[in-house]
Amino acid sequence: MSRLALSGTTALILLASSGVSLAQEVLRISSWGGGWRDLIAETIAAKFTENTGAEVEFITGGTIDRLNQAQLAAGAPESDVTFTTAHVGWLYQNSGLFEPLDMSRLSNADKLFDQAKISPGHVGVWSYVYTIVYVPDLVPDVRFDSWADLWSPALAGKIGLSDFDPSSIIAATAKMEGLGIEDWRQATDKLKALKPNVRAYFPSDAASEQLISTGETPVQVMLSMMAHQLRDQGIDLEIVIPKEGAVLNMDAIGIMKGTDKLDLAYAFIDAALDPEVQAKIVAIKKGGATVEGVEVPPEVAALPGVFLTPEQWQSEAIYVDPQLRAEKLTEWRTWFSEEMIAN
């Protein structure tokens, strides 16, 4: 557990039941560590503290580790608010771990994209895509206009794919074959035909970063935010949105059932949905927004994967419903392990 105490102005909100200033309160946030914790601290938590004067304490860990711990602590949560991925959020929801959200308590709720209203208990806070990323000097003779270009014989032994979440390549292949994601098994022969081009299956986004940075896998289906970060560090990468679209994902936020900081939790989520806060998140991580009215510099808005409107989600993205993804991920991982990796 790590603690971040954020100084702020005098509390603007009083606890209705007790009259105690929220400045005396501490809100516990479950999130990833490292840069993700820092992002939340610098943007959402800073705005929250400005609005309320309350402090924030972070409990950090991996996505599934935190879910497992939350299930063990059901009814007596260690955290008040949890950040997770949109589809894993459905696992919290189905386990009864999220408080039903009363949208009338969120002043920014009317700005949410419809697809960011993920479940009764969690909403999207930023978006990103998994798409084709490559080192141009190492694959000079291949263009990436379509997902189909990954199957080029010129890419034999050059591609890196995730082994922990194959949903992006499965969704992209189904789309390329003219199928809905529910019919993904009709695209399995096409998926297996990609195996000669795969150099490595990486177990984490950090491993993905290392493999493409060293050139071991000069082509990847990669998290766009990470690719932008590497480019900012001077690594020559190209990020492509194929004609079929990039695979859209969201990270999300929910209030833990059993929290005794409900007023603060709503104030925190409202800060997360503030268009100015979202603009800062987009500028820092170069992902997308989940609310209307986010304004960023034109050079940021033009970056691949920075989607700022629902229309971009429709025209430039392959969207896999998070609930379906939560239901299918184990099946997809099992098939991928047996048919792509083991063989």
Image (cartoon, rainbow, N blue to C red):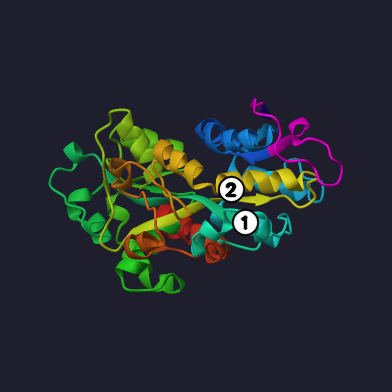
Q: Which residue is mark 2?
A: 84
Could you tell me if the residues under marks 2 and 1 are in contact, i.e. CB atoms within 8 Å?
A: yes
Binning the other alpha carbons within 10 Å of mark 1 as few (below 14), some (14 to 19) or many (20 upward) gives many
The CA span between labels 2 and 1 is 9 Å
- Residue 16 is at least partly visible in this image: yes
Q: Dividing the picture into quarters, in which one does residue 339 lie?
A: bottom left
At 28% across and 28% down in the image, what residue appears? 234
Q: Quadrant of the N terminus?
A: top right
At 37% across and 35% down in the image, what residue appears? 229
Amino acid on which the number 1 mark rests in the picture: His
Q: Quadrant of the C terminus?
A: bottom left
Instruction: Where is residue 242? Give x, y as percent.
Output: 27, 57
Instruction: Where is residue 124? Give x, y as percent.
Output: 54, 54
Instruction: Where is residue 133? Give x, y as percent.
Output: 29, 45
Question: Is 258 placed left or right of 165 in the picture?
Answer: right
Instruction: Where is residue 287? Give x, y as percent.
Output: 41, 45
Q: Dividing the picture into quarters, in which one does residue 93 lie?
A: bottom right
332 or 342: nearer the viewer:
332
At 32% across and 64% down in the image, what residue appears? 315
Q: Relative to 188, is 213 above or below?
A: above
Binning the other alpha carbons within 10 Å of mark 2 as few (below 14), some (14 to 19) or many (20 upward) gives many
Rendered image: mark on residue 122: 1
